[in-house]
Amino acid sequence: DIQMTQSPASQSASLGESVTITCLASQTIGTWLAWYQQKPGKSPQLLIYAATSLADGVPSRFSGSGSGTKFSFKISSLQAEDFVSYYCQQLYSTPLTFGGGTKLEIK
Amino acid sequence: DVQLQESGPGLVKPSQSLSLTCSVTGYSITSGYYWNWIRQFPGNKLEWMGYISYDGSNNYNPSLKNRISITRDTSKNQFFLKLNSVTTEDTATYYCARDRDGYSDYWGQGTTLTVSS
């Protein structure tokens, strides 16, 4: 199985700041990576696929980069509704696997 | 718009089987894509369990060994999860989702399952 190591597990930030989350794959996965947002009590929602492509309706303050084994997810100018949890997922091979998640907290 | 909705018993006893249903509206499950079951454990770890394809083929997570079965009823546009010999470690929120090239673009709201005697 491909292991996805996501960091940090939690991060504090202020409104308007930018944050970056990292995901490392245990083997190369090209750009077969997605990022999801999960609000409390809700299902995950797709934000980014193919490492850099924004899903429909997702604000442009969200962005993704990377290829191979190292990936980054950035939120520019944090809004109040962004302080929730985020997960990466590799799409390269089954079993599909997820990172452990990052919870954003307001500083 | 595509919508998925899970339904299930909520509580299952250890060693029994769990059965969940995912009802899909807005898209035929035979028209395309793969149809996933994903679960989230207490503590929030996400695990992909498997899928049934639009053509009826399956792919399962080997971690579930021979306990899992995903089937469908095309007349009702539903697909199902059956997990045998459950233990307390199967306590989780279970999601069904549409799989598009590996990423899930539409998810159900989730159904919580507790395994307890």
Image (tube, rainbow, N blue to C red):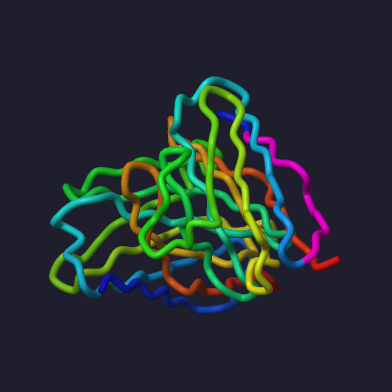
Residue B55 visible in image: yes
Between B105 and B8, the one nearer to me in the picture: B105
Position above or below: B59 against B70: above
In the image, what residue occupies the spot 48% across and 55% down?
Answer: A47
Type of secondary structure dominating the magenta stretch: strand
In the image, what residue occupies the spot 58% across and 45% down?
Answer: A88
Magenta stretch holds residue A10: yes
In the image, what residue occupies the spot 50% across and 72% down?
Answer: B110
Count of numbered labels shown in the rendering: 0
User: Which quarter of the picture shows residue A77?
Assistant: bottom right
User: Which quarter of the picture shows residue A40?
Assistant: bottom right
Position above or below: A38 against A90: below
Between B84 and B9, the one nearer to me in the picture: B9
Residue B83 visible in image: no
| First to last magenta residue range | A4-14
Image spot of residue B106 (x, y percent): 37, 63
Magenta stretch holds residue B86: no
Between A10 and B85, the one nearer to me in the picture: A10
Position above or below: A12 against B117: above
Between A2 and A48, the one nearer to me in the picture: A48
Image spot of residue B87 (x, y percent): 65, 58
- In the rendered image, which quarter contains the N terminus of chain A? top right
Residue B21 placement, left or right of A18 = left
